[in-house]
Amino acid sequence: MSVPLALKTEGPVTERHVVLVHPEVHWNTGNIGRTCLGAGARLHLIEPLGFRLDDKHVRRAGLDYWPRVDLSVWADFAAFEAGLAPEAAEMALFTKAGKRLFWEMPRPRRLFLVFGSESRGLPPALLERYLGRSFRIPISDQIRSLNLSTAVGIALYESLRGLC
């Protein structure tokens, strides 16, 4: 994992992982990849995807940065968990019905920021498995939700606050 120059380098290296569960919109994923690269975070995509990774729109949204994104694609969430073995304390699941506000999320050395698909959000079974690990970004009642790439950017940089 690359570490952004702005992060402090004393002590253990901070790891940030953005996990998209069944993303549907190619340009959101491209934008999120670019944001992850800028923040030194890894991007994990949980299949099925609503697009192909070789889609020109993914590459366009990620600009010429897309080939440098630290990207892993997983067949399902179980494969992701088996591969990286995240502890419950390292998980922060984002949903508009989250139990706590996003600025209350923990900031362990290794943190997984988990987001659901644009139309369905996170699967209920996943939210139940990580009960108490759900967070929300407050919004007015004028909209249903934030754009996924906007929400990821807010959460990712908030998770790094105090480390720069």
Image (cartoon, helix red, strand yellow):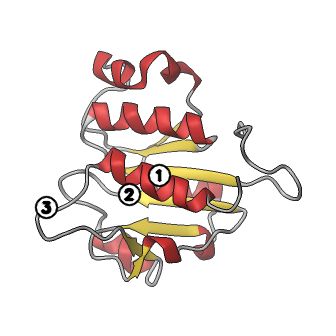
As drawn, the label of residue 143 is 3
**Residue in view at x 47 percent, y 35 percent:** 33
Q: What whole-number distance in Å separates the C-alpha atoms at marks 2 and 1? A: 6 Å
Q: In this figure, which residue is indicated by the disc labeled 2?
A: 115
Percent across and percent down for residue 136 are 36, 71
Residue 22 in view: no
- Of 156 and 69, which appears nearest the observer? 156
Measured Cα–Cα span from mark 1 to mark 3: 24 Å
Q: Secondary structure at mark 3?
A: loop
Would you call the spot at circle 1 few (<14 residues within 10 Å), some (14-19), or many (20 or more)? many
Q: Amino acid at mark 1?
A: Val
Tag 1 residue: 19
> Pointer 2 and pointer 1: residues touching (CB < 8 Å)?
yes
**Label 2 neighbour load within 10 Å: few <14, some 14-19, many 20+:** many
Which residue is at a point 69% across and 53% down the rendered structure image? 15
Amino acid identity at mark 2: Phe
Q: CA distance from mark 2 to mark 3?
A: 18 Å
Closest to the camera, between mark 1 and mark 3, is: 3
Q: Is residue 3 left or right of residue 127?
A: right
Looking at the rendered structure, the secondary structure element under dot 2 is: strand
Which residue is more in the foreground, 115 or 3? Answer: 3
Q: Please give left or right for residue 37 compared with residue 10 in the image.
A: left
Q: Earlier in the sequence, mark 2 or mark 1?
A: 1
Count residues near mark 3 (Cα–Cα under 10 Å), then give few for <14, some for 14-19, many for 20+: few
Left or right: 103, with 95 as reference point: right
